[in-house]
Image (cartoon, rainbow, N blue to C red):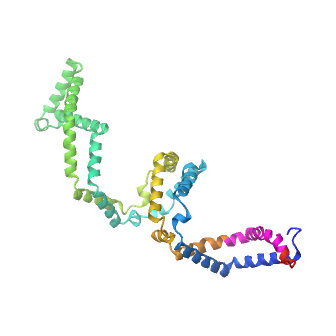
């Protein structure tokens, strides 16, 4: 105590600290927490979201904590270590895919995806128009045509010696006229170049007609049946710790960049504004109820997490020290001294 405190003030402080310490453990602490949670929960039925906070305040938190906070370089390393531990955990070899996602759930996801017919047709169209796909088609057709001409057509298959004669004639012609192969290849590829748009268009039409909902449903579910009994370890076979760490690092680097884009900020603002438009003038209890939080949930978590934490703080001596820091200024204050001295 301060030198200005009286022995009576010292005694009152010690009694007060002892009282509070006794109240902050066991059944008394549990009762206190239950009472205060009930009181706060009741307040939530009277106080609106707009009275508690605002759009700008929430966006400020997002800006400071999510977008601008400097993240320690050790974070991706720790995340990679955790991912590696998960990857080699025994549970990977003991858990089958169907234990995580049931066939009914997979079917439900598929049915929703099948509703996106327009998106499916657009994806097919974009794939068909991609230069890589067009090059693939061109090469497949070219090599298929050349192979058919020299080996797989009906004449070379059914007439003995014709295939060998064609190859012999081809080789002889090449020796006689250098560059004949190149000229032949150029002509075929020129023809393919002219014919490719029509081939692609027919392919697209064929796929849109062939990939019916029923065909896709049967194909996807057949694939699912072949996978659902596999363990998670089977499914990620071939992914080692090094590759996993690289993926984690790439994801971390993406997040660092993405969180600072205007797109991310605008999406966050749209979500926050909508939240306040819907709940701003309504009691907080409406928002809590809509996300599944009620008084029993709060009390359960406070008891499970709060009481052990208070017990630890008491064991470490922090709780008593905090009480003394809080109460000593009062017991050494002039108004208390005046009261204890018998003043008005």
**Magenta extent:** 310-337
Q: Nearer the viewer, residue 197 or 266?
A: 266
With respect to residue 10, does 263 lie above or below?
above
Q: Nearer the viewer, residue 343 or 109?
A: 343
Q: Nearer the viewer, residue 8 or 73?
A: 8
Q: Nearer the viewer, residue 53 or 210?
A: 53
Q: Position of residue 75 (x, y in %)?
A: 58, 51
Q: Position of residue 36 (x, y in %)?
A: 61, 76
Q: Is residue 272 left or right of residue 169?
A: right
* Quadrant of the image occupied by residue 303: bottom right
With respect to residue 34, does 227 lie above or below?
above
Q: Is residue 318 left or right of residue 70?
A: right
| Residue at figure coordinates x 86%, y 79% from the top left | 342
Q: Position of residue 188 (x, y in %)?
A: 20, 29
Q: Is residue 329 left or right of residue 267?
A: right
How many tags in the picture? Answer: 0
Residue 332 appears in the picture as rendered: no
Task: Quarter of the image for the C terminus: give it.
Answer: bottom right
């Amino acid at each position: 105590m301060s030198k200005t405190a009286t022995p009576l003030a010292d005694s009152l402080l010690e009694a007060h600290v002892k009282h509070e310490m006794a109240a902050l453990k066991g059944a008394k602490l549990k009762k206190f927490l239950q009472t205060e949670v009930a009181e706060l929960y009741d307040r939530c039925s009277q106080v609106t979201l707009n009275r508690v906070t605002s759009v700008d305040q929430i966006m400020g938190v997002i800006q400071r904590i999510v977008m601008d906070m400097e993240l320690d370089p050790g974070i991706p390393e720790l995340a990679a270590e955790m991912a590696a531990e998960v990857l080699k955990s025994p549970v990977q070899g003991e858990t089958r895919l169907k234990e995580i996602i049931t066939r009914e759930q997979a079917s439900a996801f598929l049915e929703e995806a099948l509703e996106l017919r327009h998106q499916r047709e657009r994806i097919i169209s974009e794939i068909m128009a991609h230069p890589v796909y067009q090059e693939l088609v061109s090469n497949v057709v070219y090599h298929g045509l050349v192979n058919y001409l020299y080996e797989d057509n009906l004449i070379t298959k059914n007439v003995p010696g014709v295939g060998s004669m064609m190859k012999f004639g081809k080789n002889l012609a090449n020796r006689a006229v250098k560059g004949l192969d190149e000229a032949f290849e150029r002509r075929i590829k020129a023809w393919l170049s002219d014919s490719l748009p029509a081939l692609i268009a027919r392919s697209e039409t064929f796929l849109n007609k062939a990939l019916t909902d029923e065909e896709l449903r049967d194909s996807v579910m057949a694939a699912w049946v072949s996978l659902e009994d596999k363990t998670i370890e089977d499914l990620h076979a071939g992914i080692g710790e090094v590759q996993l760490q690289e993926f984690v690092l790439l994801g971390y680097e993406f997040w660092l960049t993405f969180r600072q884009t205007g797109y991310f900020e605008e999406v966050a603002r749209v979500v926050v504004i909508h939240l306040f438009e819907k709940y701003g003038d309504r009691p907080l209890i409406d928002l809590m109820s809509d996300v599944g939080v009620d008084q029993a949930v709060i009390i359960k978590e406070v008891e499970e997490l709060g009481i052990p934490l208070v017990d630890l703080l008491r064991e470490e001596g922090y709780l008593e020290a905090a009480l003394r820091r809080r109460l000593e200024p009062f017991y050494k204050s002039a108004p208390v001294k005046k009261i204890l001295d018998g003043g008005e």
